[in-house]
Image (cartoon, helix red, strand yellow):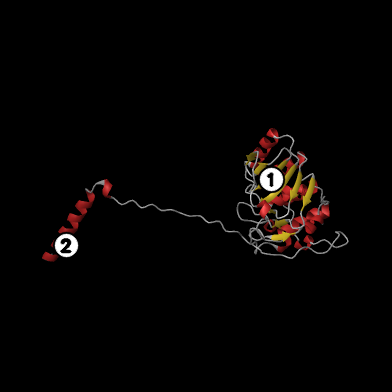
């Protein structure tokens, strides 16, 4: 026999079910789920030791390269070691601007900012508008957001026969070092700053996560040879850059860079 209390509970539940069934659609609650994806970088700790670039090749013997050892590591992870000098605090008046480039007179460009996929086109437009340009002063150049575009731009700088200069207080880092290397004539002040580190692909894998015979390495080595390094110096410089993880930076001096390429 069913108790009166049970009958009452059944009727209450049925009434609630009926109300929910005929409730207007506008009264229904909508829940939105947002997913945030964060990239992390693999340190390559599990990579096969036999398949990575030999970091010992980063330091050539003194009989191969003149001069002493490289500058000590400093301020790992910093954007740059020091603030730009007062004279470089601003780019000043410019005749025209093309992305990170500012044309300051008929012969001189100043560069500050990253290279993006649009930068090679901006550079080409600048040369078309100002065909007498001769010098590229690199003021504060953090690097590249598009490595393929960076190498295209570097080769365009070389074809244009531009002189690349890092003035006193100037800083070039990461992919911007490749741009400086592209100069038909290269100059750098004694306090010029060169920051290097390993490249990383879109999956967070760094140079030393790839086997030593992977074609990706050949592209960089070929570029360094194209810019005037012999085979030994190209391999040494490439290994030196890749000895520092992507999230860090190793600072080199003008004297350090002179061990790998000719400066004027």
**Lower sequence index among marks 1 and 2:** 2
Q: In this rendering, which labeled residue sits more in front, label 1 or label 2? A: 1
Would you say 146 lies left or right of 15 here?
right
Give how far across and how far down residue 27 sits, in percent.
26, 49
* Front-lying residue, 31 or 126: 126
Would you say 94 lies left or right of 33 here?
right
Give how far across and how far down residue 137 sits, in percent.
72, 47
Residue 51 seen in this snapshot? no
Which residue was labeled with disc 2?
A: 9
Residue visible at 68% across and 50% down in the picture:
139
Residue visible at 57% across and 58% down in the picture:
40
Q: Secondary structure at mark 1?
A: strand
Which residue was labeled with disc 1?
A: 110
- Of all residues shown, which one is farthest toward the right? 63
Q: Quadrant of the N terminus?
A: bottom left
Q: Secondary structure at mark 2?
A: helix
**What is the quadrant of residue 77 in the picture?**
bottom right
Dot 1 surroundings within 10 Å: few (below 14), some, or many (20 or more)?
many
Residue visible at 76% across and 42% down in the picture:
162
């Amino acid at each position: 026999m069913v108790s009166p209390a049970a009958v009452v509970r059944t009727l209450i539940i049925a009434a609630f079910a009926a109300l929910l069934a005929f409730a207007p659609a506008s009264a229904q609650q909508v829940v939105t789920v947002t997913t945030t994806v964060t990239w992390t970088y693999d340190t390559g700790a599990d990579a096969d030791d036999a398949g990575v670039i030999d970091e010992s090749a980063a330091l050539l013997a003194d009989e191969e390269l003149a001069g002493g050892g490289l500058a000590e590591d400093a301020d790992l992870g910093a954007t740059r070691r020091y603030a730009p000098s007062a004279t470089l605090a601003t780019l000043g008046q410019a005749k025209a601007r093309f992305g990170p480039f500012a044309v300051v007179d008929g012969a001189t460009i100043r560069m500050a900012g990253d290279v993006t996929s649009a930068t090679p086109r901006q550079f080409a437009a600048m040369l078309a508008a100002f065909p007498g340009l001769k010098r590229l002063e690199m003021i504060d150049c953090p690097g590249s957001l598009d490595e393929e575009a960076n190498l295209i731009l570097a080769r365009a700088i070389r074809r244009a026969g531009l002189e690349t200069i890092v003035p006193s207080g100037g800083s070039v880092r990461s992919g911007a070092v490749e741009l400086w290397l592209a100069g038909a004539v290269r100059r750098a002040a004694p306090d010029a700053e060169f920051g290097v580190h390993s490249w990383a692909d879109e999956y967070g894998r760094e140079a030393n996560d790839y086997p030593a015979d992977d074609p990706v390495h050949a592209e960089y080595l070929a570029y360094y040879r194209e810019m005037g390094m012999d085979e030994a110096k190209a391999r040494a410089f490439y290994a030196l850059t890749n000895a520092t993880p992507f999230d860090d930076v190793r600072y080199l001096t003008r004297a350090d860079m002179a061990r790998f390429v000719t400066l004027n």
